[in-house]
């Protein structure tokens, strides 16, 4: 369900610009890469890009309580160069606490910004409010000014996350926002698109809420549509390590925050997530989906499974490790490319309709 949610987010994230995709010329190589700290997931990282961060954990004593110590956090950046002129970043899901309905809060004992059991005290925010008040200051602490080009609520993302969370059968409330901004940094003007979902735990949480699936992508202002195919390929390539996920939930069970029933639900999810792409997208008209996102279905010559990849290049190859090379030149052969130093690339053809 996590991968299915990312599918919908990707459609909305990139279609929200209402612009046609650009196209990168020549070849483009993606390497199968794993989250560096706990091997929580794998993804395609463009060749020569770097990554920073990963899974981290908050100790209850250091965090002032257990409110954010139960689950793993992710702060993860993938960037084209050291300056991050082209980059994507996932920001951590954090729990917050709204004290407005609490007698202690009403007495002024926990002002906004204070700590309540390891959670920042903060009134509940919408997705767009969270982007303005939390995401931008967190991601760009030195940014003094920016311009909002476009902002919108996203009921589509809300519906997607409701379906993703249907396994847990909890009455959560959601609000999702998408914002596009421009700003200058060290002489370069950037365009950045940001998504964030705010989830209210409702009566179950008695004031607790959190952000989820908060991510951003930026490029120089006139290059965003050119890099969209690369951003898409990265997002579609994310595969959760189910062993890690189950161990993570077991740890949460041991810490008394998640029921064993949730663990059983996640174990049931494994088979669904491992199914081929066409089944994963069963709720979406496949051809319409591929056209909308400018993707294509390919057959992996090693596994004979269907994989979704970009259609922004004419040719696609894959090696035994799962690395992918895209190119436009019909005479190009990655096995003859001295820079790759591999001889096991096979052409990944389009699935026959």
Image (tube, rainbow, N blue to C red):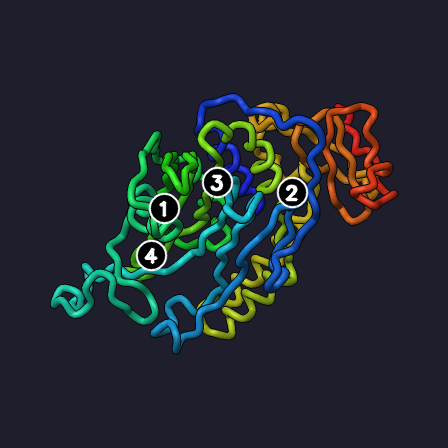
**For residue 299, side relative to residue 88 (left or right):** right
Pick the residue in front: 80 or 259: 80
The residue pinned by badge 4 equals 209
Q: Earlier in the sequence, mark 4 or mark 2?
A: 2
Pick the residue in front: 330 or 256: 330
Give me the residue at 17% from left, 65% from top. 105
Distance CA(mark 4)–CA(mark 2): 35 Å
Q: Position of residue 312 (x, y in %)?
A: 65, 26
Q: Are marks 2 and 1 in contact (CB under 8 Å)?
A: no
| Quarter the C terminus occupies | top right
The residue pinned by badge 3 equals 217
Pick the residue in front: 21 or 270: 21
For residue 39, the mark is none
The residue pinned by badge 1 equals 174
Extreme-front residue of the structure: 187
Secondary structure found at label 2:
strand
Q: Are marks 4 and 2 in contact (CB under 8 Å)?
A: no
Q: Earlier in the sequence, mark 4 or mark 1?
A: 1
Residue 121 sits in quarter: bottom left
Residue 31 visible in the current orientation: yes
The residue pinned by badge 2 equals 46
Number of disc labels: 4
Secondary structure found at label 4:
strand
Distance CA(mark 4)–CA(mark 1): 10 Å
**For residue 268, side relative to residue 113 (left or right):** right
């Amino acid at each position: 369900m996590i991968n299915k949610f990312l599918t919908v987010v990707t459609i909305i994230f990139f279609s929200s610009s209402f612009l046609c995709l650009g196209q990168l010329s020549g070849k483009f190589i993606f390497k199968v890469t794993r989250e560096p700290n706990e091997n929580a997931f794998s993804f395609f990282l463009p060749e020569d890009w770097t990554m920073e961060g990963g899974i981290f954990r908050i100790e209850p004593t250091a965090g002032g309580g257990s409110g954010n110590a139960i689950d793993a956090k992710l702060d993860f950046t993938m960037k084209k160069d050291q300056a991050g002129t082209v980059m994507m970043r996932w920001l951590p899901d954090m729990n917050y606490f709204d004290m407005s309905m609490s007698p202690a809060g009403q007495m002024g004992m926990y002002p906004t910004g204070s700590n309540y059991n390891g959670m920042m005290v903060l009134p509940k925010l919408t997705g767009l409010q969270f982007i303005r008040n939390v995401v931008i200051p967190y991601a760009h602490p030195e940014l003094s000014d920016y311009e909002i080009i476009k902002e919108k609520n996203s009921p589509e993302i809300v519906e997607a996350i409701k379906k993703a969370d249907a396994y847990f059968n909890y009455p959560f409330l959601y609000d999702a926002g998408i914002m596009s901004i421009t700003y200058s940094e060290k002489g370069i003007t950037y365009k950045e698109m940001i998504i964030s979902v705010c989830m209210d735990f409702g009566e179950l949480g008695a004031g607790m809420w959190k952000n989820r699936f908060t991510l951003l992508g930026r490029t120089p202002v006139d290059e965003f549509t050119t890099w969209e195919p690369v951003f898409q390929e990265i997002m579609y390539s994310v595969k959760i390590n189910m062993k890690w996920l189950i161990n993570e939930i077991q740890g949460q069970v041991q810490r008394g925050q998640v029921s064993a029933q949730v663990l059983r639900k996640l174990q049931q999810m494994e088979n669904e997530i491992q199914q081929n792409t066409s089944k994963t997208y069963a709720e979406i008209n496949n051809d319409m989906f591929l056209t909308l996102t400018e993707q294509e279905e390919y057959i992996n010559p090693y596994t004979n499974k269907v994989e979704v990849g970009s259609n922004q290049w004419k040719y696609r190859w894959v090696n035994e490790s799962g690395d992918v090379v895209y190119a436009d030149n019909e005479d190009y052969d990655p096995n003859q490319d001295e820079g790759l130093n591999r001889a096991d690339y096979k052409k990944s053809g389009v699935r026959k309709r």
